[in-house]
Amino acid sequence: MVIDIIDFEGTFDKDILKLIKNKEIFLIINKVDLLPKSVSFAELKDWVYDRVKNELNIKKDNIRLISAKKNFGINRMIKILKERKIKKAIVIGTTNVGNLLY
């Protein structure tokens, strides 16, 4: 599930959560390149986890920070999917969360 960090509340869609219930989920936080440099990625990941842990059964390691525009974090995400031998994945999110083309 792809989320736009700039519009977290608007792109963390409860209807999508219903569709992915009982699935292994990666929460892809896109557009991290737009945040101030003072924002720590570790703190950001903790903030996201605290925000979603009651609504989404997810491991903190399955929260990934990326910038599709700057190609940051995409290759690592693909590597993780390969390491876990995940052959099929669905990328889902609301409009304007970003492109994940590689």
Image: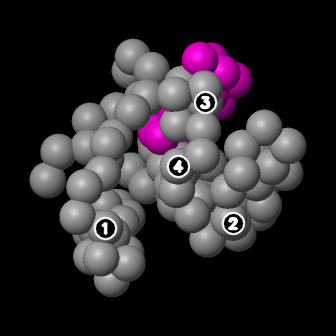
Sequence-first disc among 1 and 3 = 3
Label 3 amino acid?
Answer: Leu
Q: Which residue is mark 4?
A: 23
Which of 39/19 is in front? 19
Side of 91 where 18 appears, left or right: right
Label annotation for residue 86: 1
Sequence-first disc among 1 and 4 = 4
Q: Which residue is mark 2?
A: 60
The spot of residue 16 in percent (x, y) is 54, 24
Label 2 amino acid?
Answer: Lys
Sequence-first disc among 3 and 2 = 3
Could you tell me how far apart the alpha carbons at marks 1 and 3 are, in whole angstroms? 20 Å
Could you tell me how far apart the alpha carbons at marks 1 and 2 are, in whole angstroms? 18 Å
The spot of residue 95 in percent (x, y) is 39, 16
Disc 4 secondary structure class: loop
**Compared to 29, does 76 lie above or below?**
below
Residue 73 can be seen, yes or no? yes
Q: Which residues are magenta?
A: 1-15
Label annotation for residue 72: none
Label 4 amino acid?
Answer: Lys
The spot of residue 87 in percent (x, y) is 23, 64
Residue 79 can be seen, yes or no? no
Sequence-first disc among 1 and 2 = 2
Q: Mark 3 or 4, which is nearer the eye? A: 4
Q: Which residue is mark 3?
A: 17
Could you tell me how far apart the alpha carbons at marks 4 and 2 are, in whole angstroms? 15 Å
Residue furthest to the bottom:
83
Q: Mark 3 or 2, which is nearer the eye? A: 3
The spot of residue 6 in percent (x, y) is 59, 31
Q: Does the magenta portion include 71?
A: no
Disc 2 secondary structure class: helix
Disc 3 secondary structure class: helix
